[in-house]
Amino acid sequence: MNILLICSAGMSTCMLMKRMQQAAAAKHINAKIWAVQANLAQEHILSADIVLLSPQVRYLQNEIGQMAQGKPVLPIDLESYGNLNGERVLKMAMRQVKR
């Protein structure tokens, strides 16, 4: 599974990304999880199975969705993002991809 996180500046999102990677490793889930700033989304989006948006860029959901060509593009809920709950965000992404 390839999970792309899109953010504004990146510091909080990078911490969340690391927590998601740790959660995936602990559960033996083979996942590539990476984060890029919104202005670089076009270069990375086709490599992703799902795109998750940080709360700061959730307003870009329609624009990113058009780039994603039918792949799920979802905002990360504010509580999970604020708490850096990588396990919860990983589960959300996995549920969406399995649909």
Image: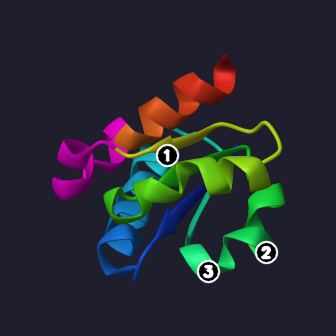
Displayed quadrant of residue 99: top right
Q: For the point 75% across and 60% down, which residue is it?
A: 45
Residue 39 occupies quadrant = bottom right
Q: Give the range drawn in magenta.
A: 77-88
With 97 as the anchor, is 47 left or right in this view? right
Callout 1 amino acid: Ala
Q: Which label is found at residue 24?
A: 1
SS under mark 1: helix
For marks 1 and 3, give the CA distance: 27 Å
Magenta span dominant secondary structure = helix
Q: Earlier in the sequence, mark 1 or mark 3?
A: 1
Q: Where is residue 72 in the image (x, y as percent from the top left)?
A: 65, 36
Q: Nearer the viewer, mark 1 or mark 3?
A: 3
Residue picked out by circle 3: 39
57 sits left or right of 98 in the view: left
For badge 3, the amino acid type reads Asn
Question: What colouring method underlies this structural image?
Answer: rainbow
Residue located beneath label 2 in the image: 43
Q: Where is residue 11 in the image (x, y as percent from the top left)?
A: 33, 81
Name the residue: 40% across, 73% down: 14
Q: Can you say whether 57 is above or below 66 in the image?
A: below
Mark-to-mark CA distance, 2 and 1: 24 Å
Q: Which of marks 2 and 1 is nearer the N terminus?
A: 1
Query: Dot 1 surroundings within 10 Å: few (below 14), some, or many (20 or more)?
Result: some
Q: What element carries label 2?
A: helix
Amino acid type, label 2: Glu
As rendered, which of 59 and 89 lies closer to the eye? 59
- Whether pointer 2 and pointer 3 mark residues with C-beta atoms closer than 8 Å, the reply is no
Q: Position of residue 80 (x, y in %)?
A: 24, 45
Q: In this view, does 44 lie above or below 93?
A: below
Q: Is residue 80 magenta?
A: yes
Eye-nearest disc, 2 or 1: 2
